Image: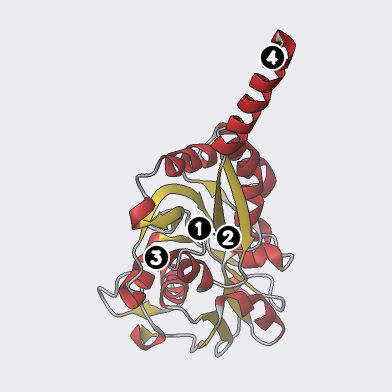
């Protein structure tokens, strides 16, 4: 074999080796900011040998079920109270591996420009899952609208309301459907990703807004059996990069906040 042919063969073998070194994982997200942020993470991870296949799911139930079943290798859509609740209820062996962003929860209205305008007896829609619905009730309590039983933790229910001076009617609907209730109710508690998807500006349109503190920071999650694998570290480092932080701050302008 000539030197030139040997050089070409060596280059080809190195190219194939480099291609083989790229590890591909499927990561589940909900539409909106989570998906947008992962698209920024993707080329950063690719430079480190990790190929992200981003799959969008329209509700909060499927990404954990798919991850636990091995149909995904990771997901990015939930906070720790929600994950803990899913693990307790369904027995999932899923662990958090890195913090991502915080989405301060908001209450929105098409009929009233401020919280004080809501008449007594108004109907307010909240999410029907324990974590997000409880989070909305805690927001209402924090703003003085209702009072809950002492020591209810992070997952209170409508049954835990002990004082409701303005006699608000609380209705529960699927989290993804809350924006659609705005034509029918006085106000609705809507998670930021669904609010953004519906054309709402969480930083400007919310008539009540959660303080960006507490346990509701979102996270990257993987199966417990995978948490120590090298690709997990690459995924977390790629997400928690200066480029991603800059994108979050510039794009969402306070509606979504970096948590690292």
Quick one: label 2, few (<14), some, or many (20+) residues within 10 Å? many
Against 207, residue 250 (above or below) is above
Pointer 1 or 3: first along the chain: 1
Whichever of labels 2 and 1 marks the residue nearer the N terminus, that label is: 2
Q: Nearer the viewer, mark 4 or mark 2?
A: 4
Residue picked out by circle 4 = 1
* Numbered label attached to residue 83: 3
User: How has the structure been colored for display?
Assistant: secondary structure
Spatial separation of the CA atoms under disc 3 and disc 2: 14 Å
Residue at 62 percent across and 35 percent down: it is: 19
Disc 4 versus disc 3: distance between alpha carbons? 59 Å
User: Are dots 4 and 1 in contact, CB under 8 Å?
Assistant: no
Alpha carbon of mark 2 to alpha carbon of mark 1: how far?
Answer: 6 Å
Q: Secondary structure at mark 4?
A: loop
Residue 70's spot in the image, x, y percent? Answer: 46, 63
Residues 251 and 73: in front is 73
**Residue indicated by mark 1:** 75
What distance separates the C-alpha of mark 4 from that of mark 2? 51 Å
Are the two marked residues, 2 and 1, in contact with CB atoms closer than 8 angstroms?
yes
- For numbered disc 1, what is the local secondary structure? strand
Quadrant in which the N terminus appears: top right
Find disc 2 in the rendering and name its residue. 29
């Amino acid at each position: 074999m000539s030197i030139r042919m040997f050089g070409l063969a060596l280059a080809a073998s190195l190219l194939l080796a480099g291609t083989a070194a790229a590890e591909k994982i499927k990561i589940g997200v909900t539409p909106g900011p989570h998906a947008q942020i992962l698209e920024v993470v993707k080329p950063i991870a690719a430079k480190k040998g990790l190929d992200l296949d981003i799959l969008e799911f329209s509700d909060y139930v499927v990404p954990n079920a798919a991850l636990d079943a091995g149909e995904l290798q990771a997901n990015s859509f939930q906070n720790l109270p929600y994950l803990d609740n899913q693990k307790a209820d369904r027995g999932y062996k899923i662990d958090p591996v890195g913090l991502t962003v915080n989405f301060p929860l908001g209450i929105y209205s098409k009929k009233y420009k401020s919280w004080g305008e809501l008449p007594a007896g108004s109907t307010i829609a909240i999410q029907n899952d324990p974590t997000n619905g409880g989070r909305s009730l805690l927001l209402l309590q924090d703003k003085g609208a209702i009072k809950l039983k002492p020591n209810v933790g992070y997952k209170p229910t409508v049954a835990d309301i002990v004082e409701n001076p303005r006699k608000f009617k609380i209705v529960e609907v699927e989290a993804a459907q809350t924006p659609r209730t705005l034509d029918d109710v006085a106000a609705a508690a809507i998670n930021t990703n669904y609010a953004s998807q519906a054309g709402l500006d969480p930083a400007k349109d919310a008539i009540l807004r959660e303080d960006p503190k507490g346990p509701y920071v979102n996270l990257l999650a993987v199966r417990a059996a995978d948490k120590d694998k090298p690709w997990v570290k690459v995924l977390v480092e790629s997400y928690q990069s200066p480029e991603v932080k800059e994108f979050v701050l510039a794009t969402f302008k306070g509606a979504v906040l970096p948590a690292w």
